[in-house]
């Protein structure tokens, strides 16, 4: 998969939390955490959209 570089502005508290997760060894780096968060968000949004498209039978 080709990766693209983007710039994101986030609150300092978010950055501190990401750094804490990396320091604890839970993730290898900030980028990996952000990729996982975006992936999970998109999965949820796609699932919601697909669910709305299924007709409800009564």
Image: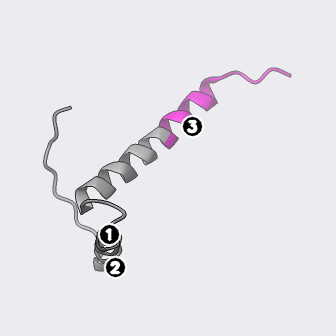
- Residue at figure coordinates x 33%, y 67% from the top left: 25
Question: Which disc, if any, is residue 13?
Answer: 2
Question: Which disc, if any, is residue 49?
Answer: none
Question: Which disc, if any, is residue 48?
Answer: 3
Few, some or many residues within 10 Å of mark 2 (<14, 14–19, 20+): few
Residue 49 is a magenta residue: yes
Q: Is residue 6 above or below residue 9?
A: above
Choose the circle earlier in sequence order: 3 or 1.
Answer: 1
Disc number lying in front (2 or 3):
2
Disc number lying in front (3 or 1):
1
Q: Secondary structure at mark 3?
A: helix
Image quarter (top left, top right, bottom left or bottom right) of the C terminus:
top right
Q: Which residue is mark 1?
A: 18
Choose the circle earlier in sequence order: 2 or 3.
Answer: 2
Q: Position of residue 39 (x, y in %)?
A: 38, 44
Q: Are marks 2 and 3 in contact (CB under 8 Å)?
A: no
Mark 2 vs mark 3, CA separation in Å: 29 Å
- Residue at figure coordinates x 22%, y 60% from the top left: 8
The magenta-colored residue range is: 44-58
Task: Report the colour scheme.
Answer: one colour
Residue 23 is a magenta residue: no
Q: Nearer the viewer, residue 18 or 23?
A: 23
Q: Are marks 3 and 1 in contact (CB under 8 Å)?
A: no
């Amino acid at each position: 998969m080709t990766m693209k570089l983007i710039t994101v502005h986030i609150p300092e508290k978010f950055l501190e939390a990401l750094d804490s997760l990396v320091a604890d060894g839970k993730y290898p780096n900030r980028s990996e955490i952000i990729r996982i968060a975006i992936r999970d968000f998109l999965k949820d949004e796609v699932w919601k959209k697909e669910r709305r498209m299924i007709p409800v039978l009564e």
